[in-house]
Image (spheres, rainbow, N blue to C red):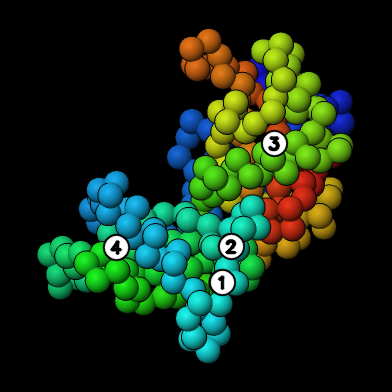
């Protein structure tokens, strides 16, 4: 059973949203097309690929070292989303040896960056940037969404109260919660009260949270009802829709 976040959220029944994803425990439809994986990288290779991609910053004219990219917390460097082998060509039997593909999200420009890197030379071979593409959020982004929610004067107290009612402890960090998140697009709120508040989602990076208070030994636990809350990570604010 889900715990009501606030009396405000408990009222009015369930919001009717146009679903592009599913509740936890099912396989959500992707919010955007992501390059397929064609073989796992080792943890060492993935870490090296991420470092190469994050160290590579380019200006609009192609010059190096502007440092304008930002992550979800506002710090320098784009947000790491995924690292994998690049998709293989139809004529090839395997992905190019020593290469990796890294997906990043740049909050400074609200764009998805895909960089192909050479693990041997440490160089970026190609870099592509697209706006309006919203892959599923990373755990770091989901935790940042919780921080924004906790900082909200309307919603933060309800989140803390729901947690305390189960655990009898204070909620001080997203790490205390079991979290899942879906990328949220404005079209899902068409016809829903409060839709204007999330009208930029899709251009902005927005997340819908599924939050559970861990049970004994970290298993099970009760859900906190955040189904009508959308976190705009780009604008760093929370919105309540569907009431």
From the image, tell me which residue sits under label 1: 67
The x, y position of residue 226, in whole percent, is 71, 34
Residue neighbourhood size for the residue with mark 2, other residues' Cα within 10 Å, grouped as few (<14), some (14–19), many (≥20): some
Residue neighbourhood size for the residue with mark 3, other residues' Cα within 10 Å, grouped as few (<14), some (14–19), many (≥20): many
Would you say residue 185 is visible in this rendering? Answer: no
Q: Quadrant of the N terminus?
A: top right
Q: CA distance from mark 2 to mark 1?
A: 7 Å
Q: CA distance from mark 3 to mark 1?
A: 36 Å
The x, y position of residue 12, in whole percent, is 84, 31
Label ID, residue 227: 3
The x, y position of residue 153, in whole percent, is 86, 38
Q: Residue at x 45, y 64 (%)?
A: 54
Q: Are marks 4 and 1 in contact (CB under 8 Å)?
A: no
What is the secondary structure assignment of the residue under circle 4?
Answer: strand
Residue nearest the viewer, comparing 102 with 197: 102
Earlier in the chain: of badge 2 and badge 1, it is 1
From the image, tell me which residue sits under label 2: 76
Label ID, residue 100: 4
């Amino acid at each position: 059973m889900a715990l009501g976040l606030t009396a405000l959220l408990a009222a009015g029944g369930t919001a009717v949203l146009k679903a592009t994803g599913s509740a936890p425990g099912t396989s959500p439809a992707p919010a955007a097309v992501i390059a397929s994986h064609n073989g796992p990288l080792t943890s060492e290779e993935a870490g090296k690929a991420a470092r190469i991609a994050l160290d590579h910053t380019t200006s609009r004219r192609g010059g190096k070292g502007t440092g304008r990219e930002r992550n979800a917390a506002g710090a320098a460097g784009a947000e790491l989303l995924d690292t994998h082998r690049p998709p293989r060509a139809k004529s090839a039997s395997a992905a190019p040896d020593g290469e990796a593909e890294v997906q990043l999200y740049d909050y400074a420009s609200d764009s998805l960056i895909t960089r192909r890197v050479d693990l041997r030379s440490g160089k970026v071979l190609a870099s592509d940037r697209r706006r309006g593409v919203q892959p599923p959020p990373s755990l770091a982004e989901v935790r940042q969404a919780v921080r924004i929610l906790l900082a909200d004067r309307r919603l933060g107290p309800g989140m803390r109260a729901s947690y305390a009612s189960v655990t009898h402890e204070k909620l001080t960090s997203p790490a205390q919660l079991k979290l899942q998140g879906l990328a949220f697009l404005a079209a899902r709120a068409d016809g829903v009260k409060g839709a204007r508040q999330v009208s930029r989602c899709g251009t902005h990076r927005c997340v819908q949270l599924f939050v559970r208070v861990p049970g004994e030994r970290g298993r099970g636990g009760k859900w906190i009802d955040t189904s009508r809350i959308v976190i705009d990570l780009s604008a760093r604010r929370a919105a309540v829709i569907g009431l």
